[in-house]
Amino acid sequence: MTVSSKDLAKKDIKGLLIKQSVPASVGILFLTVNILIDTIFVGRWIGSLAIAALSVVMPITFFISSLGMAIGTGGGSVLSRSLGAGNREKALATFAHQIMMTFGLSSIVVIFGLFFGDEILYLFGANGAIMAPAKEFFLPILLAVPFQALCMMGTSVIRAEDKSKHAMAAMILSAITNVVLDILFIKIFGWGIHGAALATASSFFLCFVYITWFFIYKSELRLQWHHFTFHKKIAGEITSLSFVTFARQGVISVLAIILNHTLYTQGGENAVTVYGIISRMLMFALFPVLGITQGFLPIAGYNYGANNFDRVKASVSLAIKYAGALAIFIFVIILFFAKPITAVFTTDPAIIRDTPEALRWVFAASPIIAVQLIGAAYFQAAGKATKALLLTLSKQGFFLIPLILILPQFFGIFGVWVAFPIADVLSTIVTGIFLKKEMAAHYNEDKE
């Protein structure tokens, strides 16, 4: 049965949050399994140096594909609020602009990457022996990034329509394709890291095919040619909110540059490999928390557009409670099973020795991150771009990058690992203050 986006304003908040978050969580799980499987197969079938190469290349490709994520999330906020306000034509025009902007911008960036690939790889930390496998992995992934960008944009729009199961299906299809082709290309054909890249690139393309099928046959957003007429106002509104997500990914990319160079200076290729494993676990282990954040966005955005502030406040409260409980559970798992988790990725004794302690430190403050994630997402859903930008950048940009530049000067490589929980605590405090003031203001307004 087709579900209308109007249900976001009517149905029980708890049920809506579960309905939106579970498919989003499963979708993110399979997306991160894509990356996780690559890392495990590459580490065990090619070698630990190949994990270091992945840690260099993936932030580059995610930076490019994050154009789609940013335009999808920012435009999704505009789209949700337009549907909530009953302005269907604006919602359709917004979707058309998302398609044009995602394809155009990602293609331009890919062309730039083709001309300056070596320089970009070195900038992101392809030092010493890491450069050769990084170059081999880079090109196939780079060429497929526009498809990934369009998939990331499309899944955000699907969730804004309240059809999150289809967004989940696209990510599951992509993940299964990647696993099957990894086994075929790496293990059976022996194509090494180039095979891993081809498998991942193929999974991006298949996701794009599914997203295209959905919007042609299943979507309630039926586009016509006149919707593709460029409107500066709509593009500007999408851009202002998209910049929040894109700036966050940009800061994450700057963080990756600083991290990879700092780690190489402090501990060589092994230290970069250790963080390669940790970064995969950061994406994988937190998938249910990120799923709740994604599921929360269309509920908050739609009801904010419809001036249902009580429902907005209820969705914020529930999202923080559920995400916080899951984050605590994840922390306990990491605390007790850090070494077995590391052993899944590699058989290298040095990596198995060094990774568990670092992994525990990086996750040390994860029980409190729900406030930071949901708080920043609320301001984005409400269309408050400046506050959303500041809060989204608070962890990586304002706290983590300066700490990583300073602490290793005094504490060596331990300074890198301890910087993560310190940044989590500081950014959560700042977000909590902003969110508390915002909720109190809207609650009072609604009662007057």
Image (tube, rainbow, N blue to C red):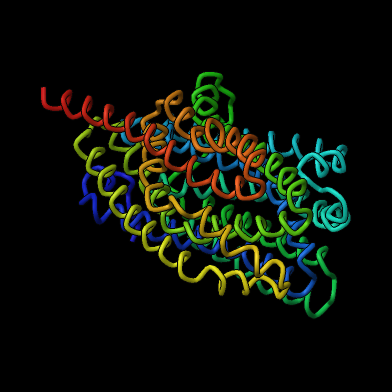
Q: Can residue 375 be seen in this view?
A: yes
Q: Where is residue 19 in the image (x, y as percent from the top left)?
A: 33, 58
User: Where is 434 relative to 404, above or below?
Assistant: above
As drawn, is 201 to the left or to the right of 436?
Answer: right
Q: Name the residue at 82% across, 54% down.
A: 134
Residues 386 and 115: in front is: 386
Q: Where is residue 327 in the image (x, y as percent from the top left)?
A: 39, 56
**Residue lying furthest bottom in this view?**
188
Residues 409 and 293: in front is: 409
Q: In which quarter of the image is the C terminus?
A: top left
Question: Within the image, what quadrant is residue 391 found in?
Answer: top left
As drawn, is 334 to the left or to the right of 434?
Answer: right
As drawn, is 371 to the left or to the right of 155?
Answer: left
Q: Position of residue 224 (x, y in %)?
A: 54, 37
Q: Position of residue 274 (x, y in %)?
A: 67, 59
Q: Name the residue at 45% across, 26% down.
A: 385
